[in-house]
Amino acid sequence: MKVLSVASRYSDQPEENVITISRIGDASCPRRYYKNYVETPRQPKPFESIELGIGQFFHSYVESHFKQIFAEDRALEDYDYIDTDDLIRRFRLSFIWEGKLREPYRIVGRRYTLKDFQDRLAGAAENFNDFVCAELPGQRIKCVEGELQIRTDACYIRGKYDLITVQGKNLVLWDWKTGRKPKPEYFDEYESLKAQLGVYATWMRYQYEGTNVRGTAVFLRDELAQQSEVFTPAVEQDVLAYMAGWRTRLNNMKSYPPVPSKLCDWCSWNEDCPAMEDLCVRGEELERQVREAEAKLQATVEKIRAKAESDRRLAEGTVPPSDRRCFVATVAFGNPACEELSVLRCFRDRWLLTCLPGRLFVDFYYRLGPSAARYVEKHPLICRAVRGVLRLAVSMLRRALPGLPVGSCPAEMDSDCVSKDQP
């Protein structure tokens, strides 16, 4: 495989002869590739993500900036940075109408706002200015924002560049990236980047008939970073084979089924994509399961907290006055101040609450007591039987335990009948 010719503008070619890095990226989903490059007549995209809009806007702004410097026919200086405030102002004028993004742009990431994207654009501008001050002073501009084409014996390879500068005998093609530099573990993104920079270096080698050429991508998201590739015969052959292989693969594609990926939300064609419909259904089901799991977890936490609080009160022997009730006995005797209730309360406070088994029994009773009392109240025969059992129990307690009240227990005795001397 070899280079037959190069050009600085595109020639008219049928789709099956042309390949670009962006086409290879879209081919990860055959349906997206079909909608972008094969479908005829070409349909307008329902929407564009604001991430893509920011990139295009930033490139356009920087292009105008360098064209003005190029028209002055001078070398770049460290003061040739862009005005960040003016960049943000123009972004607002171009994209934000009535407080919302203009059509067809939209925010895809749900957690982001317009302010987030303005901040992201400002961060890219600051990184760009750092790059200009550190890398470009002394270099002269050769070309600003142009097309490139490599004709091989297998296909036509196309691309676009942002800037070409020259310093002595060295030529550098610069490509601004408003995203992040690929992480080392993302080998597929590095592969695509290597192919793109290799195309740049190969094109410059033949276009300007020099070997001191380099293609460099400058990443402006978060942290300023660069990635470069120089021309060598090995790079040329690897890149040409890579691009021709993809062109052959796409030409042999007979159908265009959607392939879900992490880019589905950002795809301009997802509104009528069957794969996206399935993802939405699965996403809604997943959200429902998450909500149910959160509700169960919250209920469990509340139960644990209530149990811990109950255990603490029982361990301290400090049951709140509102809980100092004998539910079933009150219903059975019909008088909360009767003699039997006074005996039962004092037995509870002086003996049951002073030991762990007793505290556990009281805790169990307070959990079931209200419902048991309601049941007893609705059945007179059972109420009479319970009253008889409780009277027998009170009589046995009086004989077995000293200090229980003989008459009606006054209110103050009911609230303070836990002996301070009890262990």
Image: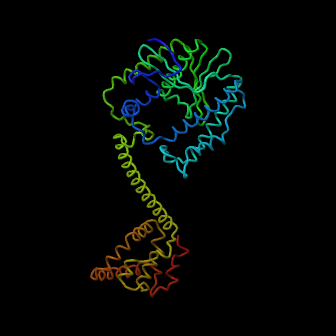
Q: Relative to residue 349, is residue 276 drawn left or right?
A: left
Question: In the rendered image of this protein, does residue 293 appear above or below residue 267?
Answer: below
Q: Please determine whether, in this image, residue 101 is positioned above or below residue 229.
A: below
Q: Nearer the viewer, residue 261 or 316?
A: 261
Instruction: Check the picture and name the quadrant holding the N terminus.
Output: top left
The relative height of residue 41 versus residue 319 in the rendered view (above or below) is above
Q: Quadrant of residue 258?
A: top left
Residue at 58%, 14% (x, y): give it: 208
Residue located farthest toward the left when viewing the structure as drawn: 381
Query: Residue 294: percent from the left, percent from the top?
Result: 43, 54
Q: Which residue lies at the image location 66% right of the left edge and 30% below the top edge?
A: 68
From the viewer's side, name the closer residue of 289 and 49: 49
Residue drawn at x 28%, y 83% is 380
Residue 369 place in picture, x, y as percent: 38, 73
Residue extending farthest to the bottom is 407
x 47%, y 64%: residue:
311
